[in-house]
Image: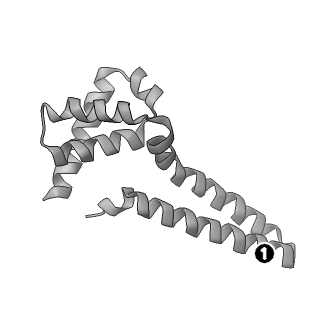
Amino acid sequence: MFSFFSSDEFIIALEVVFLLFIAYDAKRYFETRKREYIFNIVLTFGFFIYAAIPFYNKYYTWSDKAQQKLLSECLIENNTSVCECLDDMIVKEYNFSSYQELNKLDLTSFVNETKKECLEDME
């Protein structure tokens, strides 16, 4: 139902909104010199970074070759749509180095939970 929250377009739109909030609060701070606007800027910047982490993991820490290998391993067991959803969630959740260091138990539990979510979204 809420699968659009993890889409790249939603994350980019959210980042733009955060930048607009930061610009507005900076403008208001320079007009009034009230400290509450600095708190708003810091808080919004924190949310900006928090929303950008999955986007950064997906596009800057994983190579295309590693993503294709992840997809090919999944296709042995599942269909294409489940694999694409599962791989997208793995790539957004973990950067490549932390994925390689992950133990099998943690990875298996994450994959099982994510597979359930993917199957629910497809229904």
Q: Residue 17 location, x and y as percent?
A: 57, 69
The residue nearer to you, when weighing 86 against 28, is 86
55 vs 22, left or right, is left
Q: Quadrant of residue 36?
A: bottom right
Q: Quadrant of residue 26?
A: bottom right
Query: Where does the C terminus fall, quadrant-wise?
Result: bottom left
Which amino acid type is marked by label 1?
Answer: Lys
Residue at 25% x, 29% y is: 108
Q: Residue 37 location, x and y as percent?
A: 76, 69
Above or below, comparing residue 48 to residue 63 in the picture:
below
Q: Residue 39 location, x and y as percent?
A: 73, 62
Residue at 34% x, 63% y is: 4
Query: Where does the N terminus fall, quadrant-wise?
Result: bottom left
Q: Which residue is mark 1?
A: 27
Name the residue furthest front.
Answer: 65
Residue at 42% x, 63% y is: 9
Residue at 20% x, 57% y is: 121
Above or below, comparing residue 53 to residue 99 in the picture:
below
Q: Quadrant of residue 94?
A: top left
Question: Count of labels shown?
Answer: 1
